[in-house]
């Protein structure tokens, strides 16, 4: 009864007018699609930047057609300067980590499907929800503006280490207004995420349908819930850190700048700050951020795999508890980014142990996925291929974590391409595979049309093989000691590695080009795809009980009642080998 | 198509492992006294990570090959042992690995960071600034002159901001763009950043340590083979980051004495 009355309180009138329906919408589904669209814009921009970087690394003197129009100083005559390379790198990292890996799997899919999967009509705070998207959108615009200012985009990397990021334009190009825009953009982004996280948590705890106990929620709902708990704490630390950075830059404070620094032959008028303070605050956010990106992907992949395998996972509970353990441990490991930073060397050992320990829940999850495949009848679709690809990428990126978790080995591998290979595979590509799997899986529900499966599978094969060709060699480069964030390899020992870099660049160009197959499929299917039925994949959770696309109030004003946990597969149901979550029928195991 | 996934993934796993197994890409020769422990740790980890990588990928490939697109109505079964087996396996496999690597790794780390330099170690100061390293030797008096940031003047080659007119200790200091050291003698490097963060990375020495503005850090090491090795900056420091490098010149004791006399006469 209490739940029903809470639901009543959130019934709102249908939206009217174009702007209320499509722009400043309060509907969680529209907001979810807006986040996804923003992520799509960011990911193609980020990918284009990575193309430019890869191109420049192996053909440093090549002229890139049209680039001079974008930046006269950064690419005179179309040739990328070293400082513009750093701008590309900074913008690539920032766009990808914040606006893609946080936006799409968490804010995008989470917004769309969390309320539906728990049987709610909308989020707990629809206005907060709308605000969180539009604040994020403004954050994106602020960051994007940096491309067009005379100072150029920031050059201090997505980690913005102080004092490089704090002292202003004396430190070099891009570190004046470019860096200001970065700090303002990320501050706004944090506000958007804090609002979003609060909303996710309240919605999950308060708006569940009758019978939807916590343990009956789908695994992806759990993943979004745990992620929002992490996000609430992580962004709450990054926000003040960015504000202090803005104060150092604009108000003459010295939180991150010590005394006695000489830049551009000028003694800086700062004293008393600590560069390590920035690193601690940044990584206190930065490491949990890895899990903010990967946990929703884990949830989505579990959800897709179960539907494709036609059987539940060996234990959904173990997966949920493992995700909770990962979320908890994610707070104790940030120092592993700082082993050679000058931090007290005893702290390094303290941070190393939980870092190694976090591989235990991660391995449990992997083994549960693997073990669940045994004895299944896997339906191969573009969605399930990307889900299986996710497991492969997660393992590949995960095992290189064994090396970097150990301070002694990190002495040698820190700041090399080994690290770049590791995090691209484990949090970049793996999370993107989760997003793509979710897209192929839920597109019919979101748009009312099916995507083209043949194109989807072609997209998978090129992307799967291509990403291995790009990121596996990064590890080899790292073992030789190839340093990251270099715009050219002028060192004697790095010159022989250029052929391998060329191979990577070619692989990146091909893999990137394959993403246009996806984009075409997405846009074409949106308008010309076959009409989607209500439940195209024979799923069991609540999103498959409502029309495709769902009406504005999700369940047509009814309050769904839940009788089972989310994944009743491999049973004798009235419709086939499954029983819907809202079906009162008895479960007969087959 | 499940079978194709199995085949492609098997090929990817084997091709990925080949350059490592065939030692196509390896770290350079180790010229330090502490490096062998790091190398051993690296190779032990490679064996364990390689086992985990190949084992999981091949198992994934096999399961997808075997259990995809079966006939409609094929019997759905569960792996013997179920979730319990997976949890126990993860704890045993990874738990042992975590303990082994964690405990062994401490030794290699301790060799570098938990030992004090010998009292007679040669002290050299390293200064990192956009985009060059400079090294300072204390000269015959064995004392470094004080640094005055306001006196730093690169145009007049006063890279460290010394004040020889008023500071006697700085008068015999020797400043060099190259780090020359005697072989088999312990060196204590006193690290100082002039402007932003930088890092000191010599692959052959198995040393990487950041320069942090405002923080006096030091590392110590002993080089065991003469020769010239590249010192590179690994902390993003601005537009010239990629080009910030210097050479470590490990000399015989006699050659080192000659080098330092020569440098002193040039100051």
Image: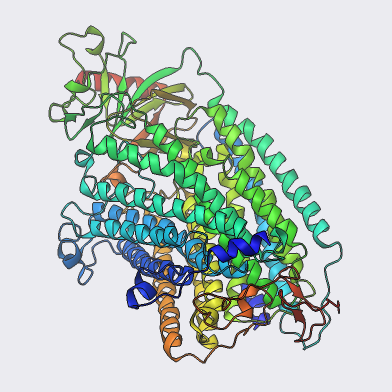
Up-down relation of residue A230 to residue B258 (above or below): below
Quadrant holding the C terminus of chain B: top left
- In the rendered image, is residue A396 in sight? no
User: Which sits in the foreground, B94 or A323?
Assistant: A323
Decide if residue B110 is in sight here.
Answer: yes
Q: Position of residue A254 (x, y in %)?
A: 29, 29
- Taking depth in this image into account, of A340 and A179 the one nearest to the observer is A179
Q: Is residue A101 above or below residue A523?
A: above
Q: How is the image coloured?
A: rainbow
Is residue A482 toward the left or the right of residue A88 in the image? right
Res. A69 image quadrant: bottom left
Q: Position of residue A566 (x, y in %)?
A: 71, 69
Identified at 58% across, 28% down, the residue is: B111
State the quadrant of the N terminus of chain B.
Answer: bottom right
Residue situated furthest left in the rendering: B155
Comparing A533 with A432, the one in front is A533
Q: Hey, which quadrant is residue A548 in on the image? A: bottom right
Measured as percent of width and height from the top left, residue A513 is found at 40, 76
| Residue under the image location 26 percent in, 20 percent down | B174
A294 left or right of B261? right
- Residue drawn at the location 64% of the way across and 77% of the way down: B5
Q: Quadrant of residue A93?
A: bottom left
């Amino acid at each position: 009864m209490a739940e029903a009355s809470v639901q009543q309180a959130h019934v709102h009138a249908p939206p009217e007018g174009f702007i209320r329906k499509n722009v400043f919408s309060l509907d969680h589904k529209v907001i979810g699609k807006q986040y996804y669209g923003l992520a799509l814009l960011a990911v193609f921009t980020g990918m284009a930047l990575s193309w430019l970087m890869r191109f420049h690394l192996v053909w440093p003197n090549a002229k890139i057609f049209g680039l001079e129009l974008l930046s006269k100083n950064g690419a005179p005559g179309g040739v990328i300067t070293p400082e513009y390379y750093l701008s590309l790198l900074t913008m690539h990292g920032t766009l990808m980590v914040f606006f893609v890996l946080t936006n799409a799997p968490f804010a995008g899919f989470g917004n769309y499907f969390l309320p539906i999967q728990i049987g709610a009509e909308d989020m707990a705070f629809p206005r907060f929800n709308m605000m969180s998207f539009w604040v994020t959108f403004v954050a994106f615009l602020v960051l994007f503006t940096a491309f067009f200012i005379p100072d150029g985009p920031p050059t201090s990397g997505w980690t913005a280490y102080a004092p490089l990021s704090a002292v202003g334009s004396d430190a070099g190009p891009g570190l004046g207004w470019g860096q200001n825009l970065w700090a303002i953009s990320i501050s706004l982004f944090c506000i958007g995420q804090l609002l979003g996280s609060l909303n996710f948590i309240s919605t999950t705890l308060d708006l569940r349908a009758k019978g939807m106990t916590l343990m009956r929620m789908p695994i992806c709902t759990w993943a979004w819930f745990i992620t929002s708990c992490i996000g609430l704490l992580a962004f709450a630390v990054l926000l003040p850190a960015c504000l202090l950075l803005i104060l150092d830059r604009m108000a003459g404070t010295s939180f991150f700048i010590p005394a006695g620094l000489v830049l551009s032959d000028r003694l800086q008028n700062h004293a008393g700050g600590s560069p390590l303070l920035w690193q601690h605050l940044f990584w206190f956010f930065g490491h949990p951020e890895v899990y903010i990106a990967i946990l929703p992907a884990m949830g989505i992949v579990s959800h897709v795999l179960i539907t494709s395998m036609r059987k539940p996972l060996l234990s959904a509970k173990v997966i949920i508890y493992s995700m909770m353990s990962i979320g908890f441990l994610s707070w104790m490991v940030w120092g592993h980014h700082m082993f050679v930073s000058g931090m007290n060397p005893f702290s390094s050992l303290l941070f190393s142990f939980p870092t190694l320990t976090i591989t235990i829940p991660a391995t449990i999850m992997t083994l549960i996925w693997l073990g669940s495949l045994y004895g299944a009848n896997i339906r191969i679709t573009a969605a399930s291929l990307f889900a299986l690809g996710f497991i492969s990428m997660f393992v590949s990126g995960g095992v290189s974590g064994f090396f970097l978790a150990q301070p002694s080995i990190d002495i040698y591998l820190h700041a090399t391409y080994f690290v770049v290979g590791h995090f691209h595979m484990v949090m970049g590509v793996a999370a993107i595979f989760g997003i793509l799997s979710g897209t192929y899986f839920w597109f019919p529900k979101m748009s009312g049309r099916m995507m083209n499966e043949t194109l989807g599978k072609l997209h998978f094969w090129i992307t799967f093989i291509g990403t291995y060709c790009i990121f596996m060699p990064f590890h080899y480069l790292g073992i030789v000691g190839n340093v990251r964030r270099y715009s050219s390899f002028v060192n004697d020992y790095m010159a022989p590695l250029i052929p391998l870099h060329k191979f990577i660049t070619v692989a990146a160009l091909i893999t990137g080009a394959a993403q246009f197959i996806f984009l075409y499929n997405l846009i074409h299917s949106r308008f010309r795809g076959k009409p989607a039925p209500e439940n195209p994949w024979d799923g069991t959770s609540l999103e498959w009980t409502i029309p495709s696309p769902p009406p504005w109030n999700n369940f047509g004003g009814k309050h769904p009642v839940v009788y089972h946990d989310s994944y009743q597969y491999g049973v004798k149901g009235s419709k086939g080998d499954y029983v819907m979550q809202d079906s009162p029928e008895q479960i007969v195991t087959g | 198509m499940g079978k194709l996934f199995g085949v492609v993934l098997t090929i990817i796993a084997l091709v990925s492992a080949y350059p490592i197994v065939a030692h196509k890409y390896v770290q350079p020769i180790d010229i330090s006294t502490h490096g062998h422990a790091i190398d051993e740790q690296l190779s032990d980890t490679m064996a364990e990570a390689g086992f985990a990588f190949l084992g999981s990928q091949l198992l994934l490939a096999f399961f997808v090959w075997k259990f995809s697109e079966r006939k409609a109505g094929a019997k759905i079964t569960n792996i013997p042992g179920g979730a319990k087996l997976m949890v126990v396996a993860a704890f045993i496999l990874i738990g042992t690995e975590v303990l082994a690597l964690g405990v062994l790794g401490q030794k290699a780390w301790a060799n570098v960071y938990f030992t004090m330099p010998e009292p007679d170690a040669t002290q050299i100061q390293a200064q990192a600034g956009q985009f060059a390293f400079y090294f300072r030797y204390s000269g015959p008096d064995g004392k470094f002159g004080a640094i005055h940031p306001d006196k730093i003047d690169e145009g007049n080659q006063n890279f460290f901001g010394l004040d020889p007119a008023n500071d006697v200790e700085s008068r015999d200091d020797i400043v060099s763009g190259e780090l020359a050291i005697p072989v088999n003698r312990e060196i204590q490097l006193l690290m100082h950043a002039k402007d932003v963060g930088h890092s000191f990375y010599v692959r052959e020495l198995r040393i990487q340590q950041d320069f942090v503005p405002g923080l006096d850090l030091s590392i110590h090491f002993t080089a065991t083979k003469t020769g010239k090795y590249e010192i590179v900056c690994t902390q993003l420091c601005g537009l010239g980051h990629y080009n910030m490098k210097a050479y470590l010149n490990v000399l015989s004791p006699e050659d080192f004495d000659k080098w330092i006399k020569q440098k002193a006469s040039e100051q």
